[in-house]
Amino acid sequence: MRNWFVAVLPLLLIVTMPSFIVPGAAKPGTAAVSEPEQGPHAVTVYVNRLELGAQGGRLAADPILWYEGEAAAAAFAEHEPDAGIDGPLDGYYIVNDVKETVEYPVAKDAEVLMQIYDRSGRIEDIQVKWNEPVSLKKFSRLLGDNDLIDLSRFPYHLTIEGGQVVRIVQQFIP
């Protein structure tokens, strides 16, 4: 038994030590947003507001962790161990352990793709239309109109390039 422990201990140290040594290291599944990543990358958020100007805008959002499939089941089991069910009902799971507001610069020509929103002011007209392009100006207006549907309750996948948001995709949730 002692030989087994001696053999496994170095492996455990190799696996666990980087999270203690690397400054700012986070547990798996979390993301630091304080320093910009190099190259295009994606982050999933709840959007709080979008302020537009001549050079683009600033998006205030709360970063979240979005899981699908087996990763969703694992995250669900970790966060909801006493739920009484085997996994998330719709195949996705959202973790938002730390509610914070992060501001992201938005390119003036950023692409916005919506799945569902109030198109006419009538509840019966609200339908899913996959990846429907809308302008940044229209998206900003839609975020402020919560009469029939509150768009801040939907996750959005942001693509960030060169330190600014170049693409916003609404995630439909049933």
Image (spheres, rainbow, N blue to C red):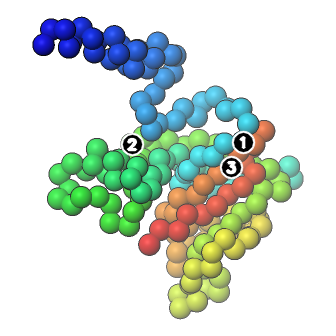
Which label is found at residue 40?
1
* Residue 17 as seen in the image, left or right of residue 38: left
**Rounded to the nearest whole Å, what is the CA distance between mark 1 and mark 2?**
25 Å
Residue 117 is at least partly visible in this image: no
Look at the image and tell me in which quarter the N terminus lies. Answer: top left
Q: Nearer the viewer, mark 2 or mark 3?
A: 3
Q: Secondary structure at mark 3?
A: strand
**Rounded to the nearest whole Å, what is the CA distance between mark 1 and mark 3?**
7 Å
Look at the image and tell me in which quarter the C terminus lies. Answer: bottom left
* Residue 15 as seen in the image, left or right of residue 123: left
Which label is found at residue 97?
2
Q: Secondary structure at mark 1?
A: loop
Give 76 or 113, whichever is nearer the viewer: 76
Which label is found at residue 167?
none
- Picture quadrant of residue 17: top left
Give 53 or 108, whichever is nearer the viewer: 108
Most distant residue in the right direction = 54
Rendering coords of residue 156 (x, y %): 58, 57
Please report the residue visible at 68 percent of the width from the left and 49 percent of the height from the top: 159
Which label is found at residue 159?
3
Q: Label 2 near label 1: C-beta < 8 Å?
A: no
Please report the residue visible at 38 percent of the width from the left and 67 percent of the height from the top: 90
Q: Amino acid at mark 1?
A: Pro
Please report the residue visible at 71 percent of the width from the left and 63 percent of the height from the top: 112
**Rounded to the nearest whole Å, what is the CA distance between mark 2 and mark 3?**
22 Å
Q: Amino acid at mark 2?
A: Asp
Give 106 or 20, whichever is nearer the viewer: 20
Q: Nearer the viewer, mark 1 or mark 2?
A: 1
Q: Label 3 near label 1: C-beta < 8 Å?
A: yes
Q: Is residue 106 above or below residue 18?
A: below
Q: Secondary structure at mark 2?
A: loop
